[in-house]
Image: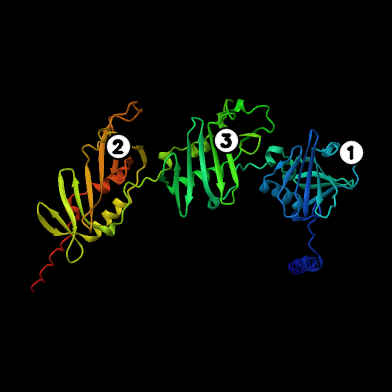
């Protein structure tokens, strides 16, 4: 009995193994069947026909996509490229019925979308009629206009073909390159204008006065303009732009490139609709009205103080011969030593200084930047505590002439409007210098760099080595 069962098992295994061997050797993988035999790069025109509207996008060879119906506007290149990719990559996963007698069950009697593609060679491919998604699984019913068969493709295909004009429109507002900008202006509704000009590797404010500009703030402003996207398409051909505050814009930003190209963005009213935070804008060279998110206006609506370079006092540390320092009631001097290095002089006593500490201190003075310019000119030092500064540093040159003086103050300010959870006065820090007439707010960290008594600059004496133990 056992022998017979063993023989039967061996025979079964041989049959299964033989079948697997024949199948593996002779069967061929079923090739993937694309819905349309077209490459993405060969698509020149896509028409999307819906029951209530038509939408057409097209491009010339090596040209960007444009929407040509129902309006003529630039298209978002990435979005339309993705649309073309979805069409060329769509696979037929199954033939459902070769010759259906009724298309209603598949949603193909009145297709939700009809997709028609034309190639650069001028060939119009059979239209793809898009029906329902399947009740179960992950499929969707489609058919080609030149074939009665109902086919199945991915369930993502119908939603990928369901587009509106706004979804396909280009949302970029400005197209300049930051490195090509030669100057820009901010014209405000109060009649004031700020002009910032590139001068070699520097940016300079030339209107309303002549100042060095902060390169970081300039790039942030230009970057915000480039990052600004249309939030809502409001009106392509408005009867009047005044209702949007664009007849007399709150702000007009104009950017000029090195090739004399000019782009402007005009900012008007804030949207009044509930739940909307947009600001009405339009490009100066075109009519349509859009909105952008409120942060865009905040990022570009800057004052001269915002854009100015906030270096408190620039100088060359190698040109400094000595520094007279007052920190609170502590007065001392840092002087270059006759044989190199630095000395600390306090109460007529000279002691060696820690040279790296002194040089670091000079670098910190040179690099001191304000967080903001709070006044220029400073009418009175008293409101900023600079009539009795905490630290005063006067730098003297090797030629015996004074390089300049920096003052730093610490002020306890009682808030005009109490903030919940915050009690007592707020500490603020300010600085000014003889290099200019401005007063700057500075950070608590910057203040701490100037809060250094003489002891912190003295050279550290090495601890005596312990005597060797006697055995």
Asked whether disc 2 touches disc 3, contact meaning CB atoms under 8 Å apart, the reply is no
Mark 3–mark 1 CB contact (< 8 Å): no
Q: Position of residue 312 (x, y in %)?
A: 32, 46
Q: Alpha carbon of mark 3 to alpha carbon of mark 1: how far? A: 56 Å
Can residue 368 be seen here? The reply is yes
From the viewer's perspective, tell me whether residue 390 is left or right of residue 13.
left
Along the line of sight, the residue nearer the viewer: 211 or 49: 211
Question: Which quadrant of the rendered structure holds the C terminus?
Answer: bottom left
What number is the disc on residue 102? 1
Secondary structure of the residue carrying numbered label 3: strand
Residue pointed to by mark 3? 266
Near mark 1 (Cα within 10 A), the count class, few <14, some 14-19 or many ≥20, is few
Identify the residue under disc 2: 428
Nearest the eye: 231 or 149: 231
Mark 2 and mark 3: span between their CA atoms?
36 Å
Residue drawn 43% across and 39% down?
304
Residue count near mark 2 (Cα–Cα under 10 Å), binned few <14, some 14–19, many ≥20 = some
The crowd level at tag 3 (other Cα within 10 Å; few <14, some 14-19, many 20+) is: many
Q: Earlier in the sequence, mark 2 or mark 1?
A: 1
Q: Secondary structure at mark 2?
A: strand
Between 329 and 323, the residue placed more toward the observer is 323
Q: Nearer the viewer, residue 50 or 380?
A: 380
* Mark 1 residue element: loop
Residue at 80% in and 64% down: 28
């Amino acid at each position: 009995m056992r022998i017979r069962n063993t023989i039967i098992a061996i025979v079964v295994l041989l049959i299964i193994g033989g079948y697997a061997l024949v199948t593996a050797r002779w069967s061929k993988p079923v090739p993937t069947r694309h819905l349309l035999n077209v490459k993405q790069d060969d698509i020149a025109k896509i028409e999307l026909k819906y029951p209530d509207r038509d939408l057409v996008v097209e491009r010339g060879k090596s040209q960007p996509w444009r929407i040509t119906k129902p309006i003529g506007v630039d298209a978002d290149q990435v979005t339309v490229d993705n649309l073309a990719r979805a069409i060329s990559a769509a696979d037929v996963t199954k033939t459902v019925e070769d010759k259906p007698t009724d298309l209603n069950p598949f949603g193909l009697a009145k297709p939700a979308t009809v997709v028609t593609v034309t190639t650069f060679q001028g060939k119009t491919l059979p239209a793809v009629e898009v029906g329902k998604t399947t009740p179960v699984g992950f499929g969707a019913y489609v058919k080609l206009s030149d074939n009665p068969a109902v086919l199945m493709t991915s369930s993502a295909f119908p939603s990928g073909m369901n587009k509106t004009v706004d979804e396909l429109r280009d949302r970029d507002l400005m197209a300049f390159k930051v490195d090509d900008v030669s100057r820009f202006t901010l014209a405000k509704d109060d009649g004031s204008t700020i002009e910032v000009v590139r001068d070699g590797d520097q940016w300079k404010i030339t209107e309303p006065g002549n100042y060095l500009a902060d390169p970081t703030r300039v790039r942030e402003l230009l970057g915000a303009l480039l990052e600004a996207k249309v939030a809502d398409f409001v009106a392509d051909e408005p009867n009047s732009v005044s209702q949007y505050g664009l007849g007399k814009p709150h702000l007009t930003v104009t950017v000029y490139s090195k090739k004399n190209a000019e782009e402007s963005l005009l900012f008007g009213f804030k949207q009044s609709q509930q739940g909307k935070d947009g600001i009405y804008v339009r490009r100066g060279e075109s009519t349509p009205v859009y909105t952008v998110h409120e942060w865009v206006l905040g990022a570009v609506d800057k004052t001269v103080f915002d854009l100015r370079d906030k270096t408190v006092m620039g100088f060359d540390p190698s040109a400094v011969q000595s520094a007279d320092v007052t920190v609170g009631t502590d007065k001392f001097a840092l002087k270059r030593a006759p044989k190199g290095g630095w000395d600390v002089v306090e109460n007529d006593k000279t002691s060696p200084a820690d040279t790296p500490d002194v040089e670091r201190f000079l670098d910190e003075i040179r690099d001191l930047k304000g967080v903001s310019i709070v006044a220029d000119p400073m009418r009175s030092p008293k409101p900023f505590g600079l009539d009795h500064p905490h630290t005063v540093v006067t730098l003297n040159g090797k030629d015996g002439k004074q390089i300049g003086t920096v003052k730093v103050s610490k002020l306890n300010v009682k808030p005009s409007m109490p903030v919940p959870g915050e009690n007592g006065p707020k500490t603020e820090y300010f600085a000014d210098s003889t290099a200019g007439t401005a007063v700057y707010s500075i950070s608590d960290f910057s203040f701490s760099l100037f809060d250094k008594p003489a002891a912190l600059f003295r050279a550290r004496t090495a601890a005596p080595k312990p005597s060797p133990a006697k055995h």
